[in-house]
Amino acid sequence: MPFRLLAGLSGRYGLGSSEKINRVSSGQVMADTKCFDGVADVFSLDYEGRGVARVHGKTVFIKGALPTEKVSFRVLREKKQFSEAETVEVLKESGERVRPACGYYETCGGCSLQHVSPTAQVALKQRILEEQLERIGRVKSEQILPPIYGSAWHYRDRARLSVSVDKKGRLKMGFQAKKTNEVVDIETCQVLPKHISDVLPMVKLLLQTLSDGGAAVRFVEFFNSRVIILLVLLFMVLLFIFYKQKGTAKTKKTTKAAKASSKKNHHPNQESIEGGSPDWVDQVNQSVSDPDQQDWEWGGSGSAGSTTSVSAQEVDPLTEYQVYKQFGYESKAAESLAGYLNGLNDGAPEKLVHELVGLSLRVGNIDMLTDALERHGSVLSEESLAEYVKAGLMSDQTHLPLRVLAENRLGWSMQEIERQIGEQPDLEEASASAPAMTNDNAGANHAPGVSKRAAIVLGKKEFTDITPEEMGAVIGFVKPEQSAKILKDKVGYETAVQQYNRAIQSSSKPASLIIDALKLDYQHEEISQFAKHLWKLYHSLGQYGRQVKERMLGWGYSLGYHEVFDDLEKGPNENKIREIGLERGYIRPTSLQMKAKYRELVQKDSSIISVNASPADEALKEVESLLMYGQLDLAIGTLEQAVLQYPQESQLYVMLFDLYERVEDWARLEQFLRLLRERVVSLPEEVVLAMSRLLQHVNQHSKK
């Protein structure tokens, strides 16, 4: 069937960011023409805008080179299947090479093809799109229609500019450089609409004022609409006025509080001063701090943290904390709650401090516990503070900051600390005053006549060099999973991979170990080991973890080409994955498999049922058919049943949440989330974040 190639055919930025090479005005001679590794004829362009050439049968990707050019190059990275290089000198220039019009082109990561004429850009992008469709999608067009040309400059309808502040408080706004988090400070942009580019200095000035007032703006999004731009500017001006008024009110409040504290008797205006905090803060604290009353209610409010962002997609930390806790992500819940409490200017509520301390103890994060007690310990009673410090020291007896806190806040000497941690803390009384605090190890009772386990080695210390005797002791006496983590950054790649392979083989749930091994392979550019570990990840996860597998597969393609990547990209079922492992020698065949080769008794007809389709894909196809005929209620019901049956398939949630927003049936959403909470233990992390955004949208809708 003929189709029109539309995606990304107009514009000058579209093939992704790329580091730029310094050029002189002629566009021919590159920086440092004295040292180069070879000369090559460039015949193609890759999706990152690099020239592709072959030197002695090996593929070389050359930054700054164009097709039909002859260049001398310098090798930057050498790999087994290919090399990465940069252009030193253009010996034969392409007729499509032009001088970049943007003054930030050499450093900014927003564009990569400004040295190519606009007409040639469209042709190159069309060819790359055809190759990607044919190689990855297995699609070849019968007829290619003429491309649609757009404006060469000021064509972008939407852009996100990063914002950062240096140590001196100076704000920078612009795109990020390639492979770094450094923000390139820009005053104008050739690809943004002109009326947006013209207001960049004014936006930067407003953001600088907000930053000086204590706000932390991470990014700014622009849309190609004059009305939206005016609204954004108005919103930023209102933010500026709000922070100014907030600073004035805070100064007045501090003055009144100082006058009130100088009098011994109760001041009549004291209640009005204390009542200056918003009522919704108390309501949120009341609803969140009581774990027995937490439910999927829609009356919760957002937080008033000190972080400001010009985006409606940011999830407030308090809502994020609630969702994380409901689905068992206690570590992330503690981080969100800590961020919320640290952003409060009027002091943290006592119940939320108890909640944060309890979460820190449950996840074993003594650093977070110490930070919480240092920041918010003033709202706790001395008995509660002592119990929390004792519980933390029982978990980590050598934690120096917590010992310093015990000495400064509680007056405990070294002998007193040893005496306290030598006894079992009375956590039952502590839990009565603060139900959130639990410590499984602290309340364990030992049977009479059985001696307590004594630690052989005390203390913690970072170490660098490992002697052969120490490495042998770790390998021989420590469990493979722990030895792999200990030796990962301390020994060579071969030894570390051997330990990971041992740990993967002995672990019942090896997915996290396999991902660590994949990171190690990626860092050392070992594509063969990466392919083997990637197959093990597919084999261990089975039909689950689609996004993780796709992300790791993308890492593999960035390393280079391997046949296993193409086999796994087809989405094989579990039997096919096992056949791939047998064929590659990743697993050993059984004796029966060596004697005979079995055939499947029943085969699927690929003309009727897709071989690679998962149950979630079949459900999505059914929903699309229902929506085509306007059966919205049946489509939502089908998705709800599919989510309950396949709770780890995150793509089901995306369409379901979208349908809920379209019909605005919040009562049905509340009922379904309660049912989901009862039946599902944990959800994928991306689903939790999407649910947080949906809850925030519902809260905003209920306020209107």
Image (spheres, rainbow, N blue to C red):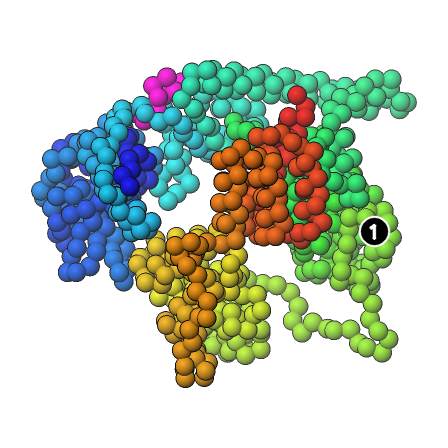
Q: Is residue 368 magenta?
A: no
In the displayed structure, does residue 617 sit left or right of residue 64? right
Residue 406 shown left or right of residue 329 in the figure:
right
- Residue extending farthest to the left is 92
* Percent of width and height locating residue 548: 48, 54
- Name the residue rendered at 21%, 56% in the picture: 59
Q: Which amino acid is tagged 1?
A: Ser
Seen from the viewer's position, the closer of residues 409 and 432 is: 432
Helix, strand or loop under label 1: helix
Left/right of residue 591 with respect to residue 67 in the rendered view: right
**Percent coordinates x, y for residue 108 in the rendering:** 33, 35
Do we see residue 331 in this rendering? Answer: no
- For the N terminus, the image quarter is top left
Label 1: few (<14), some (14–19) or many (≥20) C-alpha neighbours in 10 Å: some
Q: Quadrant of the C terminus?
A: top right
* Among the 4 quarters of the image, the one containing residue 344: top right
- Which residue: 71% across, 53% down? 361
**Circle 1 residue:** 431
- Which residue range is magenta in the image? 190-201
